[in-house]
Amino acid sequence: MKFGVSIAAASLVLTACGGSGSSDDNDNAADGSTDNTSSAEDICASADGDGPKIGVAYDVGGRGDQSFNDSAYAGVVRAVEELDATCQEAEAGANEDDVVRAERLRTLAEAGFNPVIGVGFLYSPAAAEVAAEFPDTEFAVIDGYSEFVAPADNLVDLTFAANEGSFLVGVAAALKSESDTIGFIGGTPGDLIKEFEAGFVAGVKAAKPEAELLVQYLTQDPDDSDAFEDPPGARTAAEGMIDRGADVIYHAAGKSGLGLFQAVVEAGEGVWAIGVDSDQYLTASADQQPQILTSMLKRIDTAIYDFTAAMMEGEEPSGGRKYDLSDEGVGYSTSGGFIDDITGELDDYAQQIIDGEIEVPTAP
C-alpha cells in the first residue's frame, strides 16, 4: 500500500534530538497544564544513531501543546528508540506564511535530514514546493493535502478519519451528559476541523437525538493558525457554553484546548471536557484530570513511525495514507475510568462504522 524571499534566521528555530528524554519534573505551568514533554536537548545532542535522520517541523503551539505536536513527537521518539534514528526539531512561529514554512522545510532538507516531516496541514503548499527541489529526500505532511497541490513521488500525506474517532466521543458525551446540552469548540472553520465537528455531532445525535449542540470556533478565518494557540479564547468560549447549560464540551483546537480544561475545573464537578489527538488525561494537571471524560485519539505517532520504517525498507512511500478505525488509527481513551461503563456501547458503534453499517459524515 502506498502511503496513500529572505527569511530571518530567528524564524528557523532548530533543536537537535536523538533520544526519548523523559523528565520527572511535572510542575504545573502557569496555564494550569502539566509539562510532561520537558526538553530532551541534552540527551539528543549526544545521540549518534546510524538510522534515519528525521527532520520534524512542528505546527503552531510546538512541542509541549499536550496534544497534536506532542503526539508527533512521540512518533519521533519511537523511531529514535526502535529504528536508531536521530532527529532535529524546528518550531513554528506566529502569523507565518507559506514562504516561511517552505524555508523551514528547505533548511532541514539542506542539512541532510531524510525524511522531513511537516506537522499540520498548513505545511502542504510548502512541502509540495520543497519536495520538488529535493527529489532524493522523502517528505510527509500530517493531515496534509499536498498531493492535491502538486503530487510528487517523494511526498506523502498522512491523514486520519477524525470524523470516526469524533463520532465515538460524541456518543460518550451524549451518554454521560445530564443536561443534554453538549458543546464543541473548534480552532479554525476549515475542512479539517469541520470533519471533527461533523463526526462529533453525528455521534451525539446517534446516541441522544434530543440533545442540544453548541458549536463555536475561535476564529472565522480558516487560515488563522493563531486560533490553535489561544487558551484564553477557548476558556471564554467554554464558559459561555457552560452558562448555557453545557456539561460536556469537546475541543479540536490544539493548545487552545487548555483553556477548556481550566473552564471545566472552575465550573466544578459534573462538567466534563473531552480532549483531542492524544490522551490528554495523561498530560493534564491533577486538578483537571477528574473532569477529562475521554480524548479522541489520532495515532500521529504511529503514522510517523510507520512512514519512517517504510522509508527504511525502501518502499518509497508517496501519495496518501489514511488511518481510520479499522487499523486503530483513531479511537478514544479510557484513562480515569470515567467511561468504563459505556465502552461496550462505544465499541459496538465502532464496529458498525468499520462494517459500513454507519457512514459518518465528513462535513456538517
Image (cartoon, rainbow, N blue to C red):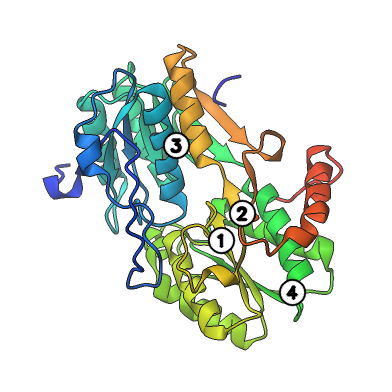
Q: Secondary structure at mark 2?
A: strand
Residue 359 is left or right of residue 303, and the answer is: right
Question: Given contact means CB atoms under 8 Å apart, are the residues at marks 3 and 4 in contact?
Answer: no
Which residue is rendered at x = 83% and y = 39% of the image?
Answer: 356
Label 1 and label 4: CA atoms lie apart by 16 Å
Picture coordinates of residue 16, whole percent (x, y):
22, 37
Name the N-terminal-most of marks 1 and 4: 4
Residue 341 lies left or right of residue 297; in this view the side is right
Amino acid carrying label 3: it is Gly
Label 1 environment density (alpha carbons within 10 Å; few <14, some 14–19, many ≥20): many
Q: Which comes sooner in the sequence, label 2 or label 1? A: 1
- Rendered image quadrant of residue 294: bottom right
Label of residue 275 in the image: 1
Do callouts 2 and 1 mark residues in contact (Cβ within 8 Å)? yes
Residue identifier under label 4 = 177
Q: Earlier in the sequence, mark 3 or mark 4?
A: 3
User: From the viewer's perspective, is 41 left or right of 340?
Assistant: left
Q: Which callout, 1 or 3, points at the residue further toward the start of the chain?
A: 3
Q: Which quadrant is home to the N terminus?
A: top right
Q: 320 or 323, which is in the foreground?
A: 323
Q: Which residue is mark 2?
A: 296
Residue drawn at point x = 36 percent, y = 29 percent:
80
The one nearer the camera, 101 or 212, is 212
Residue at mark 2 to residue at mark 1: CA–CA distance: 6 Å
> Which residue type does callout 1 highlight?
Gly
> What residue is shown with label 3?
75
